[in-house]
């Protein structure tokens, strides 16, 4: 089994208690809860960024997609 390097992080006592409770409920360790929380934060940041980009460029993207869709109707045979 490979040795996994770890470090200590400081959290408020109430946060530690919440982490311990989440770990108990999930049947896992506090480390796993923290890693899952960080994964969710990263995913949330990515989705927020994607949403902001779509809000900013959505109309342009839709117009470009329409233009590409029109090329499918150019009357040319499909090439395999």
Image (spheres, rainbow, N blue to C red):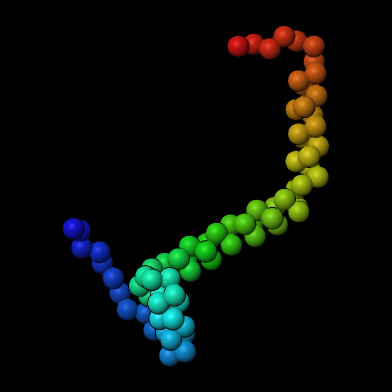
Residue ID at (44%, 75%) = 25
Q: Name the image quarter holding residue 23.
A: bottom left
- Residue 35, percent from left and from top: 42, 67
Which residue sits at x=75%, y=27%?
68
Could you tell me if residue 34 is visible in this image? no
* 75 shown above or below 71: above
From the viewer's side, name the closer residue of 5 and 13.
13
User: From where the camera sits, is residue 77 visible?
Assistant: yes
Q: Where, quadrant-wise, is the C terminus in this rendering? A: top right
Q: Position of residue 31 (x, y in %)?
A: 36, 72
**14 or 55, which lies in front?**
14
Q: Is residue 53 left or right of residue 12?
A: right
Q: Is residue 5 left or right of residue 18?
A: left
Q: In the rendering, at what x and y percent does residue 17 appear?
A: 43, 86
Toward the bottom, the furthest residue is: 13
The answer to which image quadrant residue 10 occupies is bottom left
């Amino acid at each position: 089994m490979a040795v996994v390097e770890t470090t200590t992080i400081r959290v408020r006592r109430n946060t530690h208690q919440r982490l311990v409770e989440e770990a108990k409920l999930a049947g896992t360790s506090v480390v796993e809860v923290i890693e899952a929380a960080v994964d969710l934060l990263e995913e949330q940041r990515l989705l927020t960024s994607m949403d902001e980009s779509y809000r900013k460029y959505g109309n342009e993207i839709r117009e470009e997609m329409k233009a590409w869709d029109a090329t499918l109707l150019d009357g040319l045979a499909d090439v395999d």
